[in-house]
Image: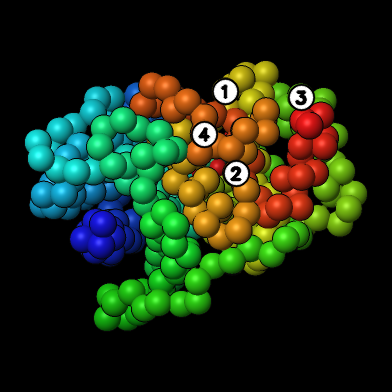
């Protein structure tokens, strides 16, 4: 596992460099979810593929930017599922973006086999957050020499102050709208950039709050992908003392992961906001 985290540090430095130096324009390709790929999506995917191929522990890789599963080492113990560049739509305006990794043991992919997760934030600073199941959430900042130095572990408070509501409001259900309005009425502040990595990172570092991406009338299963986006953050939020549930209030780590490009509605928060969500949605 540690060697995969070391690979991710190398990947972080390479993608950070690519973001700063390479062409940000569109490629002429679409990914499996139908998004037009940026040249940077393709370049980031290539950096990760190349780096993980050097690690014999990695059996299989599954990327948001690849239609198919890719076998890497037949005896490799882990499957690494990743979103190479999260927040492609905001990279051109110089907002923070990220990479997300879910490390699964074997090739049965579910919340149960997810043994570790990590994400990288490419912002004014380069930061890394990692978790191994059963352990605290570690946080690193990259210094000028390219070394990742350890910061305090991340723990959420019982209740936060931030509200990051995803999806197009006109397509929200009435239940969801009144839930989000109720948080604002309680004094929660809007913090939403359109990149789940910086939005969730902000909630984690500021001690709590809610990030939601519900099912909407145009996207009943939400937008965020189970294997690359939803489950890795669910492991991180639970390890930090928060909760991560779907719109039926089930732990995201227990949902059926479905096809490898499947999506799920998702709610990540501290305990208080998730209990409010259950109340608003009428979940016992
Ligand atoms: P990606 O760039 O990998 O396609 O992911 C973008 C995601 C996620 O980062 C963000 O939370 C969400 O899209 C924003 O969607 P909306 O613009 O619909 O709120
Ligand atoms: Mn993404
Ligand atoms: Mn992406």
Residue marked by disc 3: 173
Q: Is residue 87 above or below residue 135?
A: above
Q: Residues within 10 Å of mark 1 (few under 14, many from 20)?
A: some
Residue shown at 52%/29% (left/top)? 255
Residue that numbered label 1 is attached to: 221
- Mark 3 or mark 1, which has the lower sequence index? 3
Residue 261's spot in the image, x, y percent?
39, 26
Instruction: Say what secondary structure mark 4 lies in.
Output: helix
Image quadrant assignment for residue 72 = top left
Query: Residue visible at 48% across and 65% down?
Result: 136
Q: CA distance from mark 3 to mark 2?
A: 20 Å
Callout 3 crowding tier (Cα within 10 Å): few <14, some 14–19, many ≥20: some
Q: Nearer the viewer, mark 4 or mark 1?
A: 4
Q: CA distance from mark 4 to mark 3?
A: 24 Å
Is mark 4 in CB contact (under 8 Å) with mark 3? no
Residue to which mark 2 is pinned: 244
Q: Secondary structure at mark 3?
A: loop
Does the rendering let one see residue 82?
no
Query: What residue is at 44 percent from the left and 57 percent from the top?
Result: 134
* Residue position for label 4: 254
Where disc 2 sits, the SS reads strand
Residue 106 seen in this snapshot: yes
Q: Is mark 4 within 8 Å of ligand 2?
A: no
Q: Residue at x 9, y 36 (%)?
A: 74
Quarter of the image containing the N terminus? bottom left
Tell whether 37 sits left or right of 163. Answer: left
| Pointer 4 or 1: first along the chain | 1
Name the side, left or right, on which 269 lies relative to 145: right
Q: Earlier in the sequence, mark 3 or mark 2?
A: 3
Q: Secondary structure at mark 1?
A: loop
Q: Position of residue 258 (x, y in %)?
A: 42, 22
């Amino acid at each position: 596992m540690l060697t995969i985290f070391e690979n991710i540090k190398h990947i972080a430095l390479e993608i950070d460099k690519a973001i700063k130096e390479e062409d940000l324009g569109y490629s002429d390709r679409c990914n499996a979810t139908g998004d037009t790929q940026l040249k940077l999506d393709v370049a980031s995917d290539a950096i990760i593929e190349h780096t993980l191929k050097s690690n014999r522990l990695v059996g299989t890789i599954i990327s948001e930017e690849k239609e198919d599963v890719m076998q890497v080492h037949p005896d490799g113990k882990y499957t690494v599922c990743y979103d190479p560049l999260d927040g492609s739509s905001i990279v051109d305006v110089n907002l923070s973006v990220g990479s997300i990794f879910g490390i699964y043991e074997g090739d049965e992919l579910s919340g149960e086999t997810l043994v570790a997760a990590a994400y990288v934030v490419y912002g004014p600073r380069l930061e890394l957050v990692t978790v191994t199941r059963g352990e605290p959430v570690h946080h690193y900042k990259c210094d000028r020499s390219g070394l990742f130095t350890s910061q305090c572990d991340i723990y959420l408070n019982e209740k936060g102050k931030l509200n990051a509501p995803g999806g197009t409001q006109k397509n929200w259900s009435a239940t969801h709208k009144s839930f989000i309005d109720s948080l604002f009425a309680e004094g929660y502040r809007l913090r939403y950039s359109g990149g789940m990595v910086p939005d969730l990172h902000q909630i984690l570092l500021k001690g709590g709050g809610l990030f939601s991406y519900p099912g909407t009338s145009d996207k009943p299963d939400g937008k965020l992908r189970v294997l690359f986006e939803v489950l890795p953050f669910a492991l991180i939020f639970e390890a930090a003392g928060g909760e991560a549930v779907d719109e039926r209030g089930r732990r995201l780590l227990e949902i059926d992961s479905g096809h490898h490009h499947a999506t799920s509605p998702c709610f990540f928060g501290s305990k208080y906001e998730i209990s409010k969500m259950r109340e608003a949605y009428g979940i016992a």
